[in-house]
Image: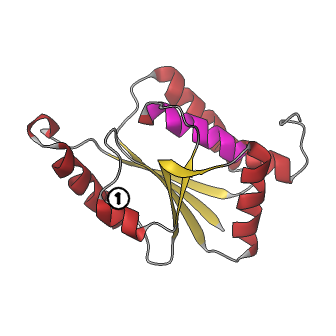
Amino acid sequence: MKIKIIVIGKTHKKFLVEGENEYLNRIQHYIQVEKIEIPDLKKAKHLSESQIKDQEGQLILNKIDSSDWVVLLDEKGKQYGSVEFSKWNQERMNRGLKQITFVVGGPYGFSDEVYVRANEKISLSKMTFSHQMIRMFFIEQLYRAFTILKNEPYHHQ
């Protein structure tokens, strides 16, 4: 199985970029992972929220393969604790899925077309975080999930 993470926009905060890279490198020890960064839209200031979501949605859908299991990181998604999320990952691997694609949307969320394409939605918290911060938080949770599955000492219960 392979994990693909699609994100909207570039993160300009050095500490977030370093955190993402640190955990992406750690995850490679367990599974193949690819992060695809879709550039911010040009002239977005002149677009409505709906137009931004639609244009970002098309760019996201262009990066998703027809066989991908698509999971949106969405505030209305199901919440998991870290151990539960590790079991969630194990269940998906046991199903023999070729690729799980996680998608972190832009500041306005996802278009209707992206919601239709998604297989699942996961929420990291009831709190609201910037989409740049969610990227690092989520990548760390992926790493944590694999250390839990391998009974490694990273996660303390």
Name the quadrant containing residue 9: top left
Q: Residues within 10 Å of mark 1 (few under 14, many from 20)?
A: many
Residue furthest left in the image: 46
Name the quadrant containing residue 157: top right
Name the quadrant containing residue 59: bottom left
Q: Is residue 48 magenta?
A: no
Q: Position of residue 151 (x, y in %)?
A: 91, 48
Q: Give the residues in magenta.
A: 132-143
Residue 63 seen from this side: no
Pointer 1 residue: 60
Q: Is residue 71 left or right of residue 91?
A: left
Magenta span main SS: helix
Q: Quadrant of the N terminus?
A: bottom right
What amino acid is found at the position of numbered circle 1 in the picture?
Ile
Position of 108 relative to 30 (above/below): above
User: Which residue is drawn at the image coordinates 49% and 49% (left, top)?
Assistant: 76
Position of 135 relative to 57 (above/below): above
